[in-house]
Image (cartoon, rainbow, N blue to C red):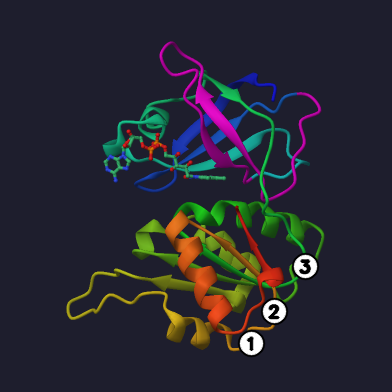
Amino acid sequence: MSNTIVEVKEAQFISNNIKRFIIEKPANYTFVPGQAAEIAINKEGWDTHFRPFTFTSLNAWENLEFLIKIYPEHKGITAELGKTNAGASLVLSEPFGAIEYKGPGVFIAGGSGVTPFISIFRELKKQNRIATNKLIYSNYTAQDVIVGAELHDLLKENYINHYTKEGVIGFREKRLNKDALIDYIKDFSQRFYVCGSHSFVHDISGMLLELGATAESLVVEQ
Ligand SMILES: Cc1cc2nc3c(=O)[nH]c(=O)nc-3n(C[C@H](O)[C@H](O)[C@H](O)COP(=O)(O)OP(=O)(O)OC[C@H]3O[C@@H](n4cnc5c(N)ncnc54)[C@H](O)[C@@H]3O)c2cc1C
């Protein structure tokens, strides 16, 4: 796989822990909405440490966009990206990934797992094909939601926020469990797209199968 050095054109926090990067797009660089690339920071000591991040831009855009959750406590690549600003350079791999739009369905995202769906929904909106697609977006709290206002604009009543730790007095932690899925979905003979941490994808996929979804109807990052 060939890598390219690219310039960071813009970088700013859009919430307390999500940073938006606008990055130079190499000539003839294309991807399928939903795909990701491996990224490293092009400076000594960091340029061989790659992590995967998903394009949230569209091919038609002049630049690439990434929305990246920064984990300062990991002292890893995202902590360093938290200190990386316009003018810096990154190492960008070729695109890869299994998530792509295969037709209308229910999208279920946990945290920063929503990023492939952002690119897919933006592309569908552009093509006037967003139709009956539905998003169930699970986060600890409302503060963790990425581009919530835009997702609401794109999907209207088909956008559902689920919070597992919204901190109000007397609140009981509400897992995205089978009862919640039945409440939100009802018809399990649809196509499902699932993205989030490994355990999120594992747990949600397992529950969907138990509720009647077929293995062929699940689109997940392997
Ligand atoms: C295909 C794919 C696409 C992705 N797309 C996106 C995206 O678009 N946006 C996005 O935000 N994320 C995305 N991710 C997740 C992203 O890749 C990770 O958040 C990122 O790799 C974290 O890198 P890191 O170096 O900061 O931390 P890590 O690699 O998680 O860890 C770095 C160090 O911190 C330690 N560590 C790990 N966990 C903890 C902890 N809880 N507390 C303290 N230390 C810890 C580790 O031992 C390690 O030494 C994607 C992941 C995949 C697989």
Q: Amino acid at mark 2?
A: Gln
Residue 220 in which image quadrant: bottom right
Magenta stretch secondary structure, dominant: loop
Residue 184 is at least partly visible in this image: yes
Residue 95 in which image quadrant: top right
- Is disc 3 surrounded by few (<14), some (14 to 19) or many (20+) residues within 10 Å? few
Q: Which residue is mark 1?
A: 187
Q: At x 71% / y 49%, what residue is drawn?
A: 33
User: On the picture, is 107 further left or further right than 95?
Assistant: left
Residue 197 is at least partly visible in this image: no
Which of the two labelled residues, at mark 3 and mark 2, occupies the earlier sequence position? 3
Q: Amino acid at mark 1?
A: Asp
Residue 2 in which image quadrant: top right
128 versus 21 height, above or below:
below
Residue 202 position within the rendered picture, expressed as x and y whole percent measured from the top left: 49, 63
Residue 25 position within the rendered picture, expressed as x and y whole percent measured from the top left: 70, 28
Q: Which mark is residue 12?
A: none
